[in-house]
């Protein structure tokens, strides 16, 4: 439990860190440098969660609103594309989407994502 301004923050009843560790190991198997971006993203999400609770809002309600909005948007996107969902068939599909986004962010920052490390695209 983390204390922040007399508020306590516990995510997923203690399951958040083991789940995060499992996911980071999966991403490490894909590319050794990929998890670094997710550590930064995870720290930002944990901070945002704590800030939501400090404001007195229910983290569960905020998470449900964000999830529902994203899910509706995804359903609309799949309807426009004419494609079916594939991530419900396999956990790997659920985890690969964020990896693609993180690789895209690395590329926009000027880095090439390679299995042997993160090398600057400008200075190979």
Image: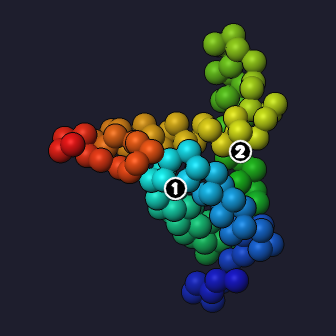
Going by the image, does 98 lie left or right of 14? left
Residue drawn 21% across the image and 43% down it: 124
- Occupied quadrant, residue 9: bottom right
Q: Is residue 49 above or below residue 123?
A: below
What's the image's color scheme?
rainbow
- Occupied quadrant, residue 82: top right
Mark 1 vs mark 2, foreground winner is: 1
**Residue 67's spot in the image, x, y percent?**
71, 44
Q: Earlier in the sequence, mark 1 or mark 2?
A: 1
**Residue 83's spot in the image, x, y percent?**
70, 14
> Which numbered dot is residue 65?
none
Going by the image, does 76 lie left or right of 15? left
Q: Is residue 1 above or below residue 92?
A: below
Residue drawn 58% across the image and 84% down it: 4
**Residue 58's spot in the image, x, y percent?**
73, 65
Circle 1 residue = 35
**Of 38 and 55, which appears nearest the observer?**
38
Going by the image, does 116 lie left or right of 63? left
**Of 37 and 28, which appears nearest the observer?**
28
Q: Secondary structure at mark 1?
A: helix
Q: Is residue 13 above or below residue 106?
A: below
Residue drawn 66% across the image and 37% down it: 70
Circle 2 residue = 67
**Of 9 and 96, which appears nearest the observer?**
96
Q: CA distance from mark 1 to mark 2?
A: 23 Å
Q: How many neighbours does mark 1 have within 10 angstroms: few (below 14), some (14-19), or many (20 or more)?
A: many
């Amino acid at each position: 439990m983390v204390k922040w301004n007399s508020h306590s923050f516990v995510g997923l009843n203690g399951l958040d860190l083991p789940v995060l560790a499992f996911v980071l190991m999966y991403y490490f198997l894909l590319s050794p440098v990929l998890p670094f971006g997710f550590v930064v993203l995870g720290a930002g999400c944990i901070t945002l969660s704590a800030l939501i609770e400090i404001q007195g809002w229910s983290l569960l309600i905020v998470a449900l609103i964000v999830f529902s909005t994203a899910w509706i948007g995804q359903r609309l996107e799949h309807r426009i594309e004419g494609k079916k969902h594939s991530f419900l068939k396999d956990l790997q599909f659920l985890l690969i989407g964020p990896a693609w986004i993180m690789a895209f962010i690395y590329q926009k920052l000027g880095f090439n994502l390679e299995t042997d490390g993160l090398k600057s695209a400008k200075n190979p």
